[in-house]
Image (spheres, rainbow, N blue to C red):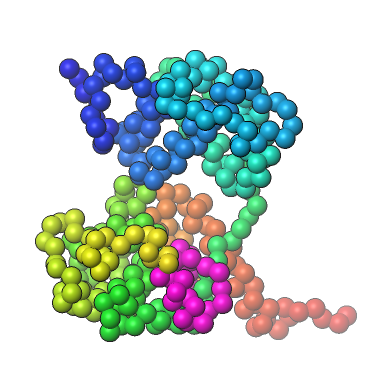
Amino acid sequence: MAVILTGETPVPRAHMSNLSLIEEYLRHLDAERNFSGHTIRSYGIDLRQFCQFLATPAVPTAEGMKLADLPAVDLEAERSLTGRLLAVTSDDIRGYLAVLHNSLKAKSTIARKLAALRSFYKHLVRRGRLETSPVSVVRSPRQDRRLPKCLDLEQIESLLGAPPADTLGGSRDRAIFETIYSAGLRISEAVGLNLSDMDELSETARIRGKGRKERLAPLGEAAMTALQRYLLLRRGVVQQAKAADSPLFVNLHGKRLSGRSIRRNFDKYLKLAGLGVHVSPHTLRHSFATHMLNNGADLRSVQELLGHKSLSTTQIYTHLTTTRLKEVYDKSHPMAGSRAG
C-alpha cells in the first residue's frame, strides 16, 4: 500500500480521503514545502479559525460580529466543511476580514491570516480542486510602516557585558547574546544550535533558518571568546553529550534552552545594564543588520547573513541607516541648515 510521508506519522494514501482539506494542506507544507513546525501550526490555527466563521448558521453579515461570537469547530466538523470551503466566495473572505476588524485585530495579524487563506486556496487551485481562488481579488490591508528598533553600540556593549562571565548561567547567557548579535540570528536559530554546528577552527556556525534552509554564519572574536568560556564552564557542571544533535545552549539540567527562557533572561540583563528601553532579544538581530550597513556592508551581503529569502525584507534596515546618514548630514554639511536670504 502506498504511503505518504509527512515528517510525522506516515499516512496511507488510501486514508488521505479521510483527511480534511486543511489537514491535507498542512501535511503538504510539512512533506513537500519543508515549512517549519511553528509556521505549520500558525497556518493551522488561522485556517481553523476561518472554519469557525464558515460554521455559523449564516455567514456573519451583521455589523459588530466578533471572533468571540463564532462557534467552536472540532475535527469532525472541520472534515464536514469540505464542500463549504470549496464554495467560498470573495464576499465570504471580506466578511471574515470584517469580523477580524471588529475584533480589533492588528493590521499585521489580519494580513497574516489573509496570507494563510491566500496560500491555502492557491494550493487548492494547483491541485485542481478549484478553478480560481476566492482570495485572488481581495487586497491585503495596508500596513503601517514600523521601523525595527535598534540599540546603539554603547547600549549593545552594556547589555553584552551584563551577564557574569564566571558562572555557568551567566557565561551561557553572555555567549547567547554575543552569538545572536555577532551572526544576526533569530532566537529560534540560536535555540536550535547544536554542539556539532560550531566550527572553532573556521570561527563559523551552521545555522538552520526558516524553511529548514541552512547557512554558514561567521562569528566574531568576542562571540568565540564567550562561547569558549561557556563551554569550559559547562564541562564542569553539565555532562557533555556526544550525539550530533546535542544542544549547544542548555539549562542547568542539560536540556535544550527554550526561547522563552532566553527572553526572560534578556529582560533581566536589560534592567541590570540600566537600559530603560522596551526591546526583545530579536533587537540584537536588528542591531546587527543596522550596524553592518552603517559600517559599509552591502545590502546583498547582509541579506545572506540574515538568511532573508527576499532582498526587500532586508531593505527595511536601509531606512534606519538613512535616518542616521541624515543626522550626520545635518550636523556636518555647512549648508544643511536654512540660510538667511
Front-most of 196 and 126?
A: 196
Relative placement, left or right, of 260 versus 283 is left
Q: What secondary structure predominates along the stretch shown in magenta? A: helix
Relative placement, left or right, of 106 versus 201 is right
The residue lying at 30 percent from left, 75 percent from top is 169
Residue 92, x across and y down, in percent:
62, 24
Residue 66 sits in which quadrant?
top right
Relative placement, left or right, of 340 versus 128 is right
Q: Is residue 277 visible?
A: yes
Position above or below: 70 against 246: above
The residue lying at 69 percent from left, 39 percent from top is 102
Residue 13 sits in which quadrant?
top left
Residue 42, x across and y down, in percent:
45, 41
Q: Which residues are magenta?
A: 265-293
Residue 189, x across and y down, in percent:
34, 58
Front-most of 328 and 80?
A: 80
Residue 8, x across and y down, in percent:
26, 35
The residue lying at 55 percent from left, 69 percent from top is 278
Front-most of 304 and 164?
A: 164
The residue lying at 13 percent from left, 63 percent from top is 241
**Quarter of the image that includes the N terminus:** top left
Q: Is residue 142 visible?
A: no
